[in-house]
């Protein structure tokens, strides 16, 4: 349209194209810079995570063990090999993988619900997954073990996945009327579902023996102390599926930011995007809960910070959230095992201590509005 | 190509839509042809937006068919349909802090997937200029006024049309109250831009408006909807009579109202 602005501010079309080019180039530089900073921070944390702990292992020893392990050298006599290869390396990798998947599922869920306050931990999805994991531990051992021997680890993620999936689907069905998701309904229904799952988990505690009770407590607060290569083997494929789906999801979630009807007008297959998002979130939360317990607030803190720094475009938001989540959870795990060393805190305590005040700040900043 | 010999870009055939027991659209037929701007007017709750949603494929008719170039739109894949028609809905609320140029780019999210970066930047900058929002390109969408946001959404559908043109040369644009929050200059600007696009790119246009003067001034075909039914259609000066305005809008025109020339002027009105 012919400009309604004062003549001085109306620009020539070619100048506009140049300005737009400058704008997107500026964004590219900013994004690359952010990824560079985060990548470096992650390397530093990985180094800290590998060297600090009950025993301090100097960095050159860590590299030495890793190099020897990679070249297939015999490490039988090396006193650090066991700690580096079978305790710290899986623990470091698991913290990063779970952190990435939690932040990613937070970002995806927020895009799906079109609201920055959606988070698997906050709206009862993690609680549902934890309940299903608990059911698998307590009842699975009672009724399945006689059939298949000791319950394999893979049963837990499957149980947690189904729990997360049921919670997410129930939530979506309750909160969505005629294609519009009511955020107030979603949060309240999420609180109710979370409380229900919590009550059921509490009831499970009465049915369980001492060892099962310890396992249940572990799931309620979260920890990486049980990290193993087996757990990584279960979590890693799910993260890879998430990463592979990210470009498709980014496009869909960008469109959904306008609304479901508008996303359809843009030519997106809305039903498929929603189904993929719900399944992937349930899988990621289920795997995360099974591997490390219910860890809250990562999914809400990280995507929000990324949006503040880099904007809302899901093409950037999804990978940056994954990176940020890995950093946050790795950092939190290092804190969890160094604050009261040689004992360690459940990581859920650390993330809640960081996340809860952040969440309150978020509410205050939004003027108390939930964006309903 | 005048378009009268080919099937309409979008056509509703005897469509009805009901929800919660209420018949929102009843047995309505409407054909959109290339190069013509159809404007729909009618009181609140008459079924204008529902009719537009039926024609966009957003909702499925309870009875009747919606066709595009003779094919039922329900069998056309979403991306293909998106190449052929763009939709600007009423008031668009976003919750995430997208930048203005990113919102415009959303129009290319599915349709412009295969375009090169240079091409994408050209399409976006032309659309931003056409919607008079170029100076806002780097601003946050959420920080804009309602009228500015509406113009950015207009830029978004211009992007979608520009990108879809290679795949689907015959296109339609559906605008639901596109000027509701705009100032006077931008109301005229957006309608001028729409009319120019309809003429130059041979697009079939449909717009829902409330301002009878603007509707009369810009419409090739004026369609009046009341209580879910199309009650009048045709050239503006044939349609906008004192009797129709009294019957449909419950407003009595003063004696001084001018019905001269081919554009009726309906200011200075009295409630019935």
Image (cartoon, helix red, strand yellow):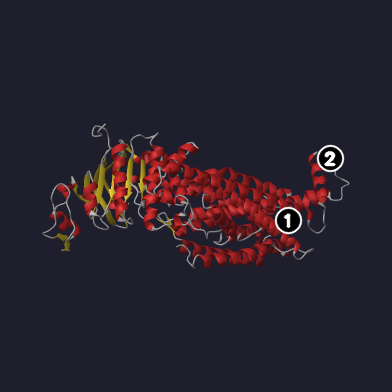
Q: Residue furthest front?
A: A8
Place of residue B163 in the rendered image (x, y in percent of width and height, measured from the top left) = 41, 38
In this rendering, position of residue B189 left or right of residue A140:
left
Tell me which residue sits at (62%, 53%) in the image.
A324
| Farthest right residue in view | A77
Mark earlier in primary sequence (2, 1): 2
Q: Quadrant of the N terminus of chain B?
A: top left
Dot label at residue A337? none
Residue A226, labelled with which disc?
A: 1
Give SS at disc 2: loop
Q: Where the C terminus of chain B falls, by quadrant?
A: bottom left
Q: Is residue A151 left or right of residue A307?
A: right
Q: Picture coordinates of residue B266 (x, y %)?
A: 18, 56
Q: Which one is in front, B65 or B104?
A: B104
Residue A244 x %, y % = 58, 42
The answer to whether any part of residue A263 appears in the image is yes
Q: Chain of mark 2?
A: A
Is A154 left or right of B58, judged from the image as shown? right
Name the one closer to the observer, B192 or B81.
B192
Q: Where A179 sits versus B198, above or below? A: below
Residue B171, above or below A370: above
Q: Do the residues at discs 2 and 1 belong to one chain?
A: yes
Q: Check disc 1: other Cα within 10 Å, few if <14, some if 14-19, many if 20+.
A: few
For this rendering, which residue is in front, A244 or A166?
Answer: A244
The residues bearing labels 2 and 1 have C-alpha atoms spaced at a distance of: 27 Å
Tag 1 subunit? A
Kindly indicate whether the residue at mark 1 contacts the one at mark 2 (C-beta within 8 angstroms): no
Residue A2 against residue A223 in the figure, above or below: above
Answer yes or no: is residue A140 visible.
no
| Label 2 packing within 10 angstroms: few (<14), some (14-19), many (20+) | few
- Which residue was labeled with disc 2? A73
Label 1 secondary element: loop
């Amino acid at each position: 349209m012919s400009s309604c602005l004062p003549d001085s501010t109306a620009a020539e079309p070619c100048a506009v194209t140049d300005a737009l080019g400058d704008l997107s180039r500026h964004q590219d530089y900013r994004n690359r810079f952010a990824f560079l900073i985060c990548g470096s921070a992650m390397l530093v944390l990985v180094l800290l995570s590998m060297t600090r702990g009950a025993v301090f292992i100097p960095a050159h020893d860590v590299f030495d063990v890793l190099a020897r392990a990679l070249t297939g050298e015999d490490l039988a006599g090396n006193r650090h090999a066991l700690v580096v290869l079978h305790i710290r390396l899986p623990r470091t990798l698991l913290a990063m993988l779970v952190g990435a998947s939690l932040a990613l599922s937070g970002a995806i869920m927020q895009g799906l619900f079109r609201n920055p306050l959606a988070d698997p931990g906050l709206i009862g999805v993690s609680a549902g997954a934890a309940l299903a994991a608990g059911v698998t531990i307590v009842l699975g051992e009672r009724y399945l073990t006689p059939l298949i021997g000791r319950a394999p680890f893979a049963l837990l993620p499957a149980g947690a996945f189904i729990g997360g999936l049921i919670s997410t689907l129930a939530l979506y069905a309750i909160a969505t009327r005629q294609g519009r998701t009511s955020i107030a309904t979603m949060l309240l229904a999420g609180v109710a579902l979370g409380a229900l799952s919590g009550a059921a988990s509490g009831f499970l505690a009465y049915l369980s023996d001492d060892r099962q009770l310890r396992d249940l407590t572990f799931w309620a607060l979260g920890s990486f102390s049980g990290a193993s290569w087996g757990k990584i083997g279960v979590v890693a494929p799910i993260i890879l599926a998430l990463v592979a789906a990210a470009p498709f999801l980014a496009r869909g979630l960008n469109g959904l930011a306008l609304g479901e009807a508008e996303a359809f007008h843009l030519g997106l297959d809305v039903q498929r995007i929603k189904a993929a998002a719900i399944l992937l979130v349930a899988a990621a939360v289920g795997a995360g809960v099974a591997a490390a317990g219910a860890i809250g607030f990562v999914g809400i803190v990280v995507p929000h910070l990324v949006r503040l720094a880099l904007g809302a475009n899901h093409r950037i938001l999804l990978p940056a959230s994954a990176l940020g989540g890995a950093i946050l959870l790795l950092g939190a795990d290092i804190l969890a095992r160094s604050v009261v060393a040689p004992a360690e805190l459940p990581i859920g305590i650390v993330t809640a201590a960081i996340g809860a005040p952040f969440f309150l700040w978020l509410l205050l900043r939004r003027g108390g509005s939930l964006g309903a | 190509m005048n378009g009268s010999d080919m099937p309409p870009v979008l056509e509703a055939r005897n469509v009805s839509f009901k929800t919660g027991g209420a018949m929102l659209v009843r047995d309505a037929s409407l054909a959109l042809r290339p190069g013509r701007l159809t404007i729909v007017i009618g009181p609140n709750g008459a079924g204008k937006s529902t009719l537009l949603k039926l024609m966009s494929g957003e909702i499925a008719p309870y009875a009747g068919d919606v066709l595009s170039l003779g094919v039922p739109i329900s069998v056309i894949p979403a991306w293909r349909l998106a190449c052929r028609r763009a939709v600007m809905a009423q008031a668009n609320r976003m919750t995430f802090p997208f930048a203005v140029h990113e919102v415009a780019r959303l129009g290319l999210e599915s349709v412009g997937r295969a375009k090169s970066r240079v091409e994408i930047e050209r399409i976006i900058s032309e659309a931003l200029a056409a919607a008079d929002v170029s100076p806002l390109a780097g601003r946050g969408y959420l920080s804009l006024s309602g009228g500015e946001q509406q113009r950015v959404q207009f830029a978004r559908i211009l992007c979608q049309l520009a990108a879809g043109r290679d795949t689907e040369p015959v296109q339609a644009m559906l605008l639901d109250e596109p000027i509701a929050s705009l100032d006077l200059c931008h109301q005229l600007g957006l309608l001028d831009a729409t009319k120019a696009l309809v003429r130059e790119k041979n697009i079939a246009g449909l717009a829902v408006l409330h301002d009878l003067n603007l509707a009369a001034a810009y419409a090739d075909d004026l369609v009046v909807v009341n209580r879910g039914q199309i009650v009048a259609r045709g050239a503006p000066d044939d349609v906008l009579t004192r009797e129709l305005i009294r019957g449909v809008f419950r407003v009595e025109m003063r004696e001084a109202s001018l019905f001269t020339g081919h554009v009726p002027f309906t200011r200075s009105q009295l409630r019935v």
